[in-house]
């Protein structure tokens, strides 16, 4: 058995290793033991998205947690950042989310937050892995009289909505604003419309009828095309698409143009600098960021740092360097003055707050950044050798890089959550980027597929 944790928790096909009920039970046991503190009544929160397999994994986690003498508090369907907030505000020992984010419904995952609402560092995940994979828990089981119990928390969603509303400036209102929300049939399907409605917006909600299998299907942050059509058709001011667990945001302007996470970062960072809220004049981004974001930040005289892909790495660098905003092209954006993790609804509120403060439509604000043409091809892989050890792949990457020169770039990396290799090329024209991207992808498929 190999490593359990990827870049965003444990993830895989539900009912197949490692996403089995047995593994969830052991993750619950190990997490409970790891975070159990002496001298108080220990508790761990559990939330989930709308996947059918969530029931199975939820009950297994509860069994594992209670078997170690820790209480489990079930909050039901709630966005991942909602669990991060509630774990911290309730002073719980840890929080667990059952979700595979933007993945299809047959996948599921388990993410863990420490008591302060932050995702776990690598060394803590490794310690949990060691307990599970080396079966170190059988000798530390508590007596029958010391077992934990499970309860349900009825007001979790309401608490989280109140938190979100407090991140929107009190001197502004959304009255008169027409907003369209795409909830991806996922965890935001109730929280997002409630939040925007309570702030006064005229809300139209799409994909808010989850059935356990339709999460992320032709909707959400991965597929915002339907959202864009409705925004234009209804003459709405803005549209927001979330992913299955609500930690990503993709925005659509009033003209139906889809904005990337990089553009959202540029819009918000520009306003934060103007308001004196951009601590250390710094934005943290990843190696997947569009070249256009770097150009835009340079024009704004804003410094930036690049990290590995993964919002946890963005967060670590933000904390280390004292940055207030950072994120990924995919739509994970972290506002550290508000929250400990990426939050799609919170980010949407910051975008519409920028529109209100500047008195300007999103299409105008988005002009702060020009997006360089980019092509991305995901190739399913059977093996994951170091890229540098595959001569044919090294050769084709070098050839493309030489052809692009300073007018583009190439990034080839394995997914942290799926068995695939991501090939990304940026360049002067869409035609060129697609051509070069396909060249590299073909070699990846031949050698690794």
Image (tube, grey):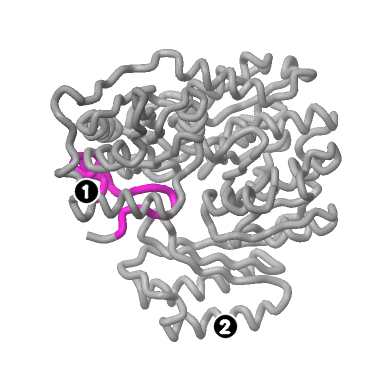
Farthest front residue in view: 39
Determine contact: label 2, label 1, CB under 8 Å. no
| Quadrant of residue 73 within the rendered picture | top left
**Left or right placement of residue 184 versus residue 411 in this view:** left
Q: Is residue 13 magenta?
A: yes
Per the rendered image, the range of residues in magenta is 3-24
Instruction: Name the residue that disc number 1 marks.
Output: 16
- Judged from the image, the secondary structure of the residue bearing numbered disc 2 is helix
Report x, y in % for residue 185: 44, 30
Residue at point 30%, 25% (across, down): 71
Instruction: Name the residue that disc number 2 marks.
Output: 398
Residue at point 70%, 79% (across, down): 405
> Residue 150 got which mark?
none
Q: Quadrant of the C terminus?
A: bottom left
**Residue 396 in sight here:** yes
Q: Residues within 10 Å of mark 1 (few under 14, many from 20)?
A: few
Q: CA distance from mark 2 to mark 1?
A: 38 Å
């Amino acid at each position: 058995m190999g490593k359990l944790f990827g870049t965003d928790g444990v993830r895989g096909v539900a009912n197949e290793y490692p996403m089995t009920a047995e593994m969830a039970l052991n993750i619950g046991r190990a997490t409970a033991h790891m975070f159990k503190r002496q001298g108080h009544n220990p508790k761990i929160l559990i939330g989930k998205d709308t996947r059918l397999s969530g029931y199975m994994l939820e009950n297994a986690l509860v069994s594992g947690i209670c078997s170690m003498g820790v209480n489990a508090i079930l909050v039901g369907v709630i966005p991942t950042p909602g669990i991060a907030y509630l774990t911290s505000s309730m002073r719980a020992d840890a929080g667990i989310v059952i979700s595979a984010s933007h993945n299809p419904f047959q996948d599921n995952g388990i993410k863990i937050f420490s008591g302060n609402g932050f995702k776990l560092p690598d060394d803590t995940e490794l310690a949990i892995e060691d307990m599970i994979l080396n079966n170190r828990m059988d000798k530390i089981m508590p007596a029958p009289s010391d077992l934990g119990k499970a309860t349900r928390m009825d007001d979790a969603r309401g608490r989280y909505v109140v938190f979100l509303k407090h991140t929107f400036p009190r001197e502004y209102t959304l009255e008169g604003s027409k907003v369209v929300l795409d909830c991806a049939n996922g965890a935001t399907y109730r929280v997002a419309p409630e939040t925007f409605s309570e702030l006064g917006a005229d809300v139209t909600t799409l994909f808010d009828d989850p059935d356990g299998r339709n999460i992320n299907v032709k909707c959400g942050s991965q597929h915002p095309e339907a959202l864009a059509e409705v925004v234009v058709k209804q003459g709405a001011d803005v549209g927001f698409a979330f992913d299955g667990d609500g930690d990503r945001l993709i925005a659509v302007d009033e003209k139906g143009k889809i904005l990337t996470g990089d553009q959202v970062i540029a819009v918000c960072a520009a306003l934060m600098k103007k308001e004196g809220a951009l601590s250390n004049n710094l934005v943290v981004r990843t190696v997947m960021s569009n070249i256009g974001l770097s150009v835009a930040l340079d024009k704004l005289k804003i410094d930036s740092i690049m990290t590995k892909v993964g919002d946890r790495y963005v967060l670590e660098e933000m904390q280390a360097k004292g940055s207030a905003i950072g994120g990924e092209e995919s739509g994970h954006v972290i506002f550290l003055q508000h929250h400990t993790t990426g939050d799609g609804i919170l980010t949407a509120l910051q975008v519409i707050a920028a529109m209100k403060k500047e008195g300007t439509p999103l299409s105008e604000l988005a002009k702060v950044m020009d997006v360089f043409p980019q092509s991305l091809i995901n190739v399913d892989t059977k093996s994951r050798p170091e890229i540098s050890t595959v001569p044919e792949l090294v050769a084709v990457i070098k050839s493309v890089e030489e052809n692009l020169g300073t007018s583009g770039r190439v990034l080839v990396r394995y997914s942290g959550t799926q068995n695939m290799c991501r090939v990304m090329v940026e360049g002067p024209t869409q035609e060129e980027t697609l051509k070069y991207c396909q060249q590299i992808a073909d070699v990846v498929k031949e050698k690794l597929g």
